[in-house]
Amino acid sequence: MQSATLVGATASTPEYCKVVGIISPVDPQAPPIKFQTNLPSSWNNKAMQFAGGGFNGIVRTGLDNVVHAPSQSPTPLDRGYATFGSDSGHTGTCTPQSAPLGPFCPLVDATFGMNEEAFVNFTSASLRKTLDVAQSLMIRFYGSAPTKQYINGGSGGGGESLAAVSLWPEKYSGAIVYYPGINTAAGVLNNATMFKKLYGANAVPGSYINPAKQAMIRTKALAICDPMDGAADQLISNPDACEAKFPVDSLRCPDGADTGDTCLSDAQMKALGTVRARNPFPFELNNEKSMAGYMVFGGPATIPYFGATPDYRQNFNANGSQDPIRYFVTRKPDENIITHDPTFWVAQWKRFASLKDSMTTAANANVARRKGVKILMVTGVADSIIGPQVPIDYYTKIVKLLGLTATRDFFRFYIIPGFAHGAPGPVGGFQATFDSLPVLEAWAEGGTAPALGSLITTDARPSAAGRTRPLCDFPSRPVYRGTGDLNLAASFKCVAP
Ligand SMILES: [Ca+2]
């Protein structure tokens, strides 16, 4: 413990003891895990763990609300929870390249992976160490451990939340999970395969799809797929149907040559196909042999895969995948995503997948179910960083193992049109908010599962004037009833495709 400070009550937050400290490493060269634990003087006997995001590297203070709660909703600390989080065992550093991300730039620094202990802490060990320290502080402060322990997070933190309840289901009562970073090694390998085809030495000349053509594709996709849900509201509710039904060949220039920004040349058609294709891996990762392709029409649109310039180094997703190859797989800081040959690094790839991803399986989710864990998972149709196919794939495997009824006994999955990676999507955006914690409490503590179609999400963008949509249990999607205000959830019903 480095400090323990009594923080006085405010209008919204009760008095609490703020404990800041470090968990020392075993390897003297490894960074410590920095943590914060907040212990309200009037405790509700419950605790909330805050998972990280990206590659972590910022201390999660536990003072925030759960991910994407409405601004007017009380935080866990306001509600009397003991709360805590950590930096997962390294401090992220910003670079000129990551500076545009502002306060979030430490989250994209993966260089800590050069140190084995920091890497293992990142892959999930820090979650348990932080949990154990926080609960031991509660026992010292209150005389007892919490009766209910929850965890919440988005992106990397969503993956961490699923990992925590999968690894230690006896410790947790529930999790709030947004667009989870799971199956990460496979995702990185998939991107490496894709970007090598798009930008590597054997890429077809002229295959780059420029921003004007990307906008053209988005406009056509919106025109065709927006009305599929009965509402011309700039929201595509069913990306799978959009991918399946979009007339791809209509994008081709008449003679296959590049005749301008209203169509795609044959080389560009091939590149678009590369992004959409299921990519076979050169070896298995956690028993997976391939990964689903990206949704480019109904999903997040094309720009994340082709970027704003033909230089792949300007591409956020390419960089986001190159860094794990450098610092987690090869530990060679000059390794390059478009020249990397994964077949020289099979053992290292498998180790990355094993440490980071092997716990988030359907079988482990079933163990969590048997221990009584309840999970609320939310993702956005328009997410380009962790595409909707990632949580869809995970959830689908759970349903395949358990059936839909047993799955819904402990796991609910909602997919929100127009919502991207924590932000509105590129067209017809939706900034989703959802008051998830009271729903999780009612389910995990009162045994009351959320009724199908009963929950709503509110678009927090000021221009949206508080429009709402139902949170539909996957695979159902919101479909307009044909009458009623387009801005009201009540005008939509959840329909299975
Ligand atoms: Ca629509």
Image (cartoon, rainbow, N blue to C red):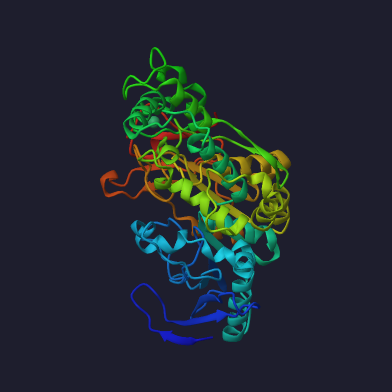
Can residue 247 be seen at all in this image of the molecule? no
Of the pair 208 and 3, the residue shown nearer to us: 208
Of the pair 464 and 424, the residue shown nearer to us: 424
Residue drawn at x 44%, y 30% is 297
Of the pair 130 and 332, the residue shown nearer to us: 332
State the image quarter where residue 8 is shown.
bottom left
Residue drawn at x 49%, y 82% is 19
Image quarter of the C terminus: top right
Where in the figure is residue 388, as x and y percent of width and height? 52, 41
Q: Residue furthest top?
A: 255
Q: Relative to 369, is 133 on the left or the right? A: left
With respect to residue 440, does 344 lie above or below?
above
In which quadrant of this rendering is ligand 1 seen? top left
Can residue 86 be seen at all in this image of the molecule? yes
With respect to residue 171, does 298 lie above or below?
above
Image quarter of the N terminus: bottom right
Q: Relative to 167, is 114 on the left or the right? A: left
With respect to residue 416, does 108 lie above or below?
below
Where in the figure is residue 199, as x and y percent of width and height? 48, 37
Q: Residue furthest left?
A: 463
Total labels drawn: 0
State the image quarter where residue 359 is shown.
bottom right
Where in the figure is residue 244, as x and y percent of width and height? 52, 24
Where in the figure is residue 341, as x and y percent of width and height? 62, 44
